[in-house]
């Protein structure tokens, strides 16, 4: 029991301290026996957070590029801190990138559900309008393919969904789920066989290898200061309403079903973005419900 209590996974994480305008780096230790976390300040060489259980944080939240809400601080996991952790988790926590091409929202919802039901979790998602430069970058491996000019024409200035997916051998498993580029040649029940029309209008695109996946994710979900100048959100903010999909629905894989229901109700999803909400933002957003809604509680 003593050995199990001390068994841990080690990661390197970064937190941006707004008050000091500094990026602070930590070793994060996750103890699977009781879902507790410990943080060690790398610069000051001392314990920053003693071993404690953080609500909502489990092992599945720890993968390279993830952001964790640890007691009000948004800490980004940047790397493994030891080879033992890397060896145990790298394949199980592999990331890949998927682009859902211009398509009806209900079909996009079905694709998302298909991915989830086959062990791939959506950890980042955004709807954006592609420029010519975006198409050239995201499809850089296809520029010599005879279909590329038609693909370029289809996607330039088009609305698409970009997704970061996490799962066991995510890159290869995702490619199998998507199927051959030509829907007529794709295996039955693959995404392209179910919803694609031809090698250009084949619904989805995925990263060909782990290195490309990381680059595509960094491109589609750029960190500051690039997030304000590349692949912006598509909200019209005109004659519209707001729908928030709560964390439990995302964890339970219900996002696809929700998108289908929105489409079937006659609404058009003009913009979509997945993000982490800090406590101060949640308090501000829900303040109007305080004292009115019985179950009001910001956690």
Image: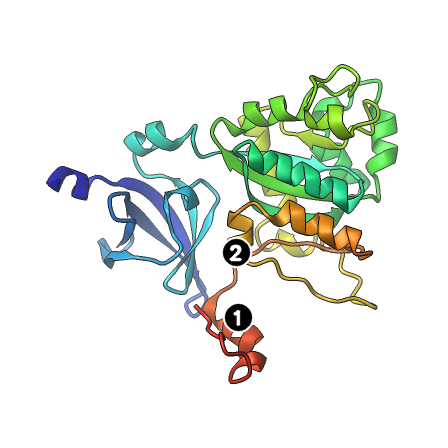
Residue 292 at x, y = what percent?
55, 83
Q: In the figure, 153 relative to 237: above or below?
A: above
Q: How crowded is mark 2: few (under 14 residues within 10 Å), some or many (20 or more)?
A: few
State the mark number for residue 281: 1
State the mark number for residue 247: 2
Circles 1 and 2 in contact, beta carbons < 8 Å: no
State the mark number for residue 60: none
Work out whether residue 231 can be spotted. Answer: no
Residue at the (54%, 79%) spot, across then down? 293
In which quarter of the view is residue 273 placed? bottom right
Residue 50 at x, y = what percent?
22, 58
Residue 245 at x, y = what percent?
60, 57
Name the front one of labels 1 and 2. 2
**Disc 1 to disc 2, how far (Cα)?**
15 Å
> For the residue labelled by badge 1, is the local secondary structure a helix, a strand or a loop?
helix
**Dot placed on the residue nearer the N-terminal end, 1 or 2:** 2
Work out whether residue 243 can be spotted. Answer: yes
Q: In the figure, 298 relative to 164: above or below?
A: below
Quarter of the picture holding the C terminus: bottom left
Q: How crowded is mark 1: few (under 14 residues within 10 Å), some or many (20 or more)?
A: few
Q: In the figure, 148 relative to 108: above or below?
A: above
> For the residue labelled by badge 2, is the local secondary structure a helix, a strand or a loop?
helix
Judge by depth and name the residue closer to the eye, 49 or 200. Answer: 200
Q: Which residue lies furthest to the left in this view?
A: 2
Residue at the (56%, 79%) spot, across then down? 289
Judge by depth and name the residue closer to the eye, 141 or 278. Answer: 278
Residue at the (27%, 51%) spot, across then down? 36
Residue 22 at x, y = what percent?
42, 61
Task: State left or right for residue 276 relative to residue 8.
Answer: right
């Amino acid at each position: 029991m003593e050995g199990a209590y001390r068994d841990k996974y080690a990661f390197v994480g970064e937190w941006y301290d707004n008050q000091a305008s500094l990026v602070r780096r930590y070793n994060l230790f996750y103890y699977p026996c009781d879902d507790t976390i410990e943080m060690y300040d790398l610069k000051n060489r001392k314990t920053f957070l003693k071993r404690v259980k953080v609500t909502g944080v489990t092992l599945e939240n720890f993968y390279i590029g993830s952001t964790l809400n640890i007691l009000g601080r948004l800490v980004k996991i940047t790397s493994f801190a030891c080879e033992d952790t890397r060896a145990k988790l790298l394949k199980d926590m592999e990331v890949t990138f998927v682009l859902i091409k211009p398509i009806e929202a209900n079909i996009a919802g079905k694709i998302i559900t298909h991915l989830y039901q086959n062990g791939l979790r959506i950890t980042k998602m955004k709807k954006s309008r592609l420029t010519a430069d975006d198409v050239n970058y995201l499809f850089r491996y296809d520029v010599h393919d005879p279909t590329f000019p038609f693909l370029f024409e289809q996607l330039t200035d088009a609305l698409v969904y970009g997704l970061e997916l996490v799962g066991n051998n995510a890159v290869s498993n995702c490619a199998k789920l998507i199927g051959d580029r030509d829907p007529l040649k794709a295996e039955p029940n693959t995404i392209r066989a179910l919803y694609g029309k031809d090698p250009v209008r084949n619904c989805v695109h995925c990263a060909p290898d782990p290195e490309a996946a990381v680059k595509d994710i960094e491109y589609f979900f750029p960190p500051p200061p690039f997030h304000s100048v590349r692949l912006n959100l598509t909200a019209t903010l005109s004659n519209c309403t707001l729908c928030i999909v709560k964390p439990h629905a995302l964890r339970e894989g219900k996002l696809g079903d929700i998108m289908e229901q929105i489409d079937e109700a006659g609404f058009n999803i003009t913009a979509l973005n997945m993000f982490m909400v800090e406590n101060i933002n949640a308090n501000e957003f829900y303040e109007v419900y305080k004292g009115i809604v019985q179950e009001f509680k910001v956690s």
